Structures are given as C-alpha cells and as structure tokens.
Amino acid sequence: GQQVMQIPQYQHVQEGEDFTTYCNSSTTLSNIQWYKQRPGGHPVFLIQLVKSGEVKKQKRLTFQFGEAKKNSSLHITATQTTDVGTYFCAEGGNNRKLIWGLGTSLGVNP
Amino acid sequence: DTEVTQTPKHLVMGMTNKKSLKCEQHMGHRAMYWYKQKAKKPPELMFVYSYEKLSINESVPSRFSPECPNSSLLNLHLHALQPEDSALYLCASSRSAGQPRHNEQFFGPGTRLTVL
C-alpha cells in the first residue's frame, strides 16, 4: 500500500539551532499535511500543501512541497523549547483516510 | 468555536466493563473520526463518519462500537476490551471527508484508556 516515509525518527538540537524533517513517497502525493503533537498532547494541524513546488511560511516554520509532489519538508529556524514535540506529515488523498508518516520527535536543549 | 472536546480525559476499566467515550464539535464539520494512538506512533484510523453515516471501518474488532447521534456528536462504546487496547483514543473532525482540500483534521485532546 501507499507509504509516506519520514526522517529522521528523532533529533535533538541545541536551542537556537535549525531543524528539518523530511517526508518522501515513491508515488505522487495529492497533498501533504503537517501536524505537531506536543508530549502528552494531541496532533494539531499546522498546514496543508497542495501545489507542486509550493512554499509556505509560518513565523520560524517553512514548509515545502517538492516539484514532483513526491516529497515535502518542514524547516524550523532557530529552534525554541516550545518547538519540542513530534512532527507528523500525512497525505490526504481523495478518500477519507490520511496516510501518516511515522513522525520526527524533536528535542530542544535549552 | 474551533474546538473538539472529548470526555472523559482518563478512563480505567476492567475487561468485563462497558464504557463509552464521547466527542463533540461545533464547527459544522461533516466528517468525524476515531483514532487509536500508541506511544511514539502516528494515530491509527479506526472509524470515519461522513454526514452521520459510517463510511470507513478499518476492520476494528466488534468490542469497539461507534455511534454518531447527530452531526456534532460521536461516541465510541467499549465492551470486553483487552489490556492491549490501552491507548490514547483521539476524536477528530474535518469540514468534509471526500475532498482533499477540505480534509485537514482537528483533533480533540483524547481519552487515555487503561484496560486492566
């Protein structure tokens, strides 16, 4: 079945360093959604990318969708302790299911 | 109101108990979801309701029984659960369930279930 691969699985950074998580698929993605889940919390929708080559920014977060719509990335500039959590990508296709990546767990050392 | 609420927050039950999880949203969303999430894993889809009708059942054991009394409410009835069913149960809603541009999902805080 369709899979969305996400790397890395874990990353620890020093506060102020940058962080990037990547999602890849062997097939073309309809769209890609990004969610953040804080420790002990629930997934929170961050953004959806639909168009080839799309780039969207939310303050220190930059989201990209590849030209071939087979990969996506989330980049955080100058991480803060409030960025701690697990970041999931998910493909939302024409059916009712999201295909989730396994998530990247981000730790930030103050 | 952009919130999905879930009750209870925590639930401990024995294998012979019957309990129910409740979920509510007032965003006018027409799709509602139940997910199960184990630690350090992505949410695992259980059921999808679209326009108050069950549209997806991901081969969930019959000891889990969903119910959608109206477009704002979603219940999950639990009976004769097993210890391996212990997990975080998340409810979510989206504007619709069939159009990719409208299927971003809004999650409730979840019910942390422990089965003894």
Image (spheres, coloured by chain):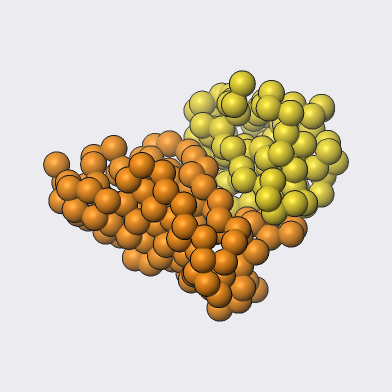
Across and down, in percent, residue A27 comes to: 60, 76
Q: Residue at x 51, y 26 (%)?
A: B9
Query: B23 or B78, which is in the foreground?
Result: B23
Q: Is residue B2 above or below residue B16?
A: above
| Residue A6, quarter of picture | bottom left
Q: Is residue A50 visible?
A: yes
Query: B77 or B108, which is in the foreground?
Result: B108
Q: Residue furthest bottom?
A: A26
Q: Is residue A89 left or right of residue B99?
A: left
Which chain does the orange colour mark?
A
Across and down, in percent, residue B86 comes to: 52, 43
Q: Residue at x 27, y 51 (%)?
A: A77
Which chain does the yellow colour mark?
B
Q: Quadrant of the N terminus of chain B?
A: top right
Q: Residue furthest top?
A: B1
Q: Is residue A54 left or right of residue B51?
A: left
Q: Residue at x 24, y 47 (%)?
A: A79
| Residue B33, quarter of picture | top right
Q: Is residue A104 left or right of residue A29?
A: left
Across and down, in percent, residue B16 comes to: 64, 35
Across and down, in percent, residue B14 comes to: 57, 34
Query: B15 or B98, which is in the foreground?
Result: B98
Q: Is residue A104 above or below residue B70?
A: below
Q: Residue at x 69, y 23 (%)?
A: B26
Q: Is residue B73 visible?
A: no
| Residue B4, quarter of picture | top right
Query: A64 or B77, which is in the foreground?
Result: A64
Task: Count every numbered label the image shows and give the total.
Answer: 0
